[in-house]
């Protein structure tokens, strides 16, 4: 029995190759480039099985070698990012951000769900290596809003407990200051190196503080800028961490 008539259908790449009259490898590039739909929805998996579904290839589809990118995303509150997590299910593909990118971009800036702000995803082996090895050594800048006024002894407690955030054996390098303060809210400015972002909430709790805003502005020399929550941009060739 041939693969085409098996009960579980045939690989999408095989169907596309037959429709396009091209090789399987070119068919896979078309799928990963976002040029193929199955029943009207963009497909991203060449190994997907199809049977009676309608498979279409965009009239202007072209086989191209996609280039790796580094992406800066304004992560909204409620999404936790784990090391090496992909962007699948988090962002939608478009003419710049193809399904191939979503599958291969990896998170190099893990963050707790309660936080928001700058997140970085990379896929080039060189960039991944640098950010995995040196990312914790870069300075991360945060804005932390907590309810009410923060007493000076709370700041002292945070300084004393900075080792609770440590990444590995190194004690974090910490610069902590009050940016603004009112009866209703205190805004803290935090610049820190060699730390683990997921430990920020517990570190604040050590001084009896609970953040209502935990927002990363900068990683090394790369800043979030004017990106609104949920928006992203491709890192420019001139930008360096």
Image: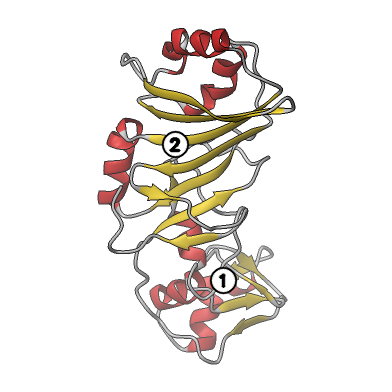
Q: Nearer the viewer, residue 95 or 210?
A: 210
Callout 2 environment at 10 Å: few (<14), some (14 to 19), or many (20+)? many
**Direction from residue 168 to residue 10 in the image, left or right:** right
**In the rendering, at what x and y percent does residue 215 appear?**
56, 38
Q: Which residue is mark 2?
A: 141
**Direction from residue 51 to residue 144 in the image, left or right:** left
Q: Which residue is mark 1?
A: 12
The residue under the point 48% across, 81% down is 17
Does residue 44 lie above or below 111 as drawn? below
Q: Nearer the viewer, residue 13 or 131?
A: 131
Does residue 169 lie above or below 235 as drawn? above
Callout 1 environment at 10 Å: few (<14), some (14 to 19), or many (20+)? many
The residue under the point 52% across, 59% down is 232
Mark 1 or 2, which is nearer the eye?
2
The residue under the point 44% across, 36% down is 141
The residue under the point 44% across, 53% down is 105
**In the rendering, at what x and y percent does residue 170 appear?**
31, 16
Q: Quadrant of residue 146?
A: top right
**Direction from residue 37 to residue 71 in the image, left or right:** left
Q: Nearer the viewer, residue 230 or 179?
A: 179
Q: Is residue 20 visible?
A: yes
Q: Element at badge 2?
A: strand
**In the rendering, at what x and y percent does residue 158 appear?**
50, 13
Does residue 190 lie above or below 127 as drawn? above
Q: Nearer the viewer, residue 2 or 37?
A: 37
Compare marks 1 and 2 and give the one earlier in the sequence.
Answer: 1
Q: Element at badge 1?
A: helix
Q: CA distance from mark 1 to mark 2?
A: 45 Å
Give the mark count.
2
> Looking at the image, what colour scheme do you see?
secondary structure
Does residue 54 lie above or below 79 as drawn? below
Q: Is residue 2 visible?
A: no
């Amino acid at each position: 029995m041939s693969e085409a008539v098996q009960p579980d259908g045939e690989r999408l790449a095989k169907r596309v190759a037959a429709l396009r009259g091209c090789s399987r490898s070119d068919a896979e590039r078309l799928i990963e480039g976002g040029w193929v739909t199955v029943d009207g929805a963009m497909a991203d998996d060449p190994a997907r099985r199809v049977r009676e579904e309608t498979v279409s290839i965009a009239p202007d589809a072209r086989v191209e070698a996609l280039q790796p990118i580094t992406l800066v995303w304004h992560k909204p509150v409620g999404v936790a990012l784990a090391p090496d997590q992909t962007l699948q299910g988090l962002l939608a593909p478009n003419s710049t951000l193809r399904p191939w990118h979503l599958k291969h971009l990896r998170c190099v800036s893990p963050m707790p769900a309660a936080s928001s702000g700058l997140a970085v995803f990379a896929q080039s082996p060189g960039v991944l290596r640098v950010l995995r090895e040196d990312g914790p050594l870069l300075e991360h800048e945060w804005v932390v809003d907590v309810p009410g006024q923060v007493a000076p002894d709370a700041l002292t407690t945070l300084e004393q407990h900075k080792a609770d955030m440590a990444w590995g054996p190194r004690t974090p390098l910490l610069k902590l200051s009050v940016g603004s303060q009112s009866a209703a809210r205190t805004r803290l400015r935090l610049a820190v190196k060699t730390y683990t972002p997921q430990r920020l909430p517990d570190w604040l709790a050590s001084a009896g503080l609970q953040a209502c805003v935990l927002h990363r502005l900068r990683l090394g020399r790369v800043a979030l800028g004017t990106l609104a929550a949920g928006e992203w941009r491709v890192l420019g060739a001139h930008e360096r961490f």
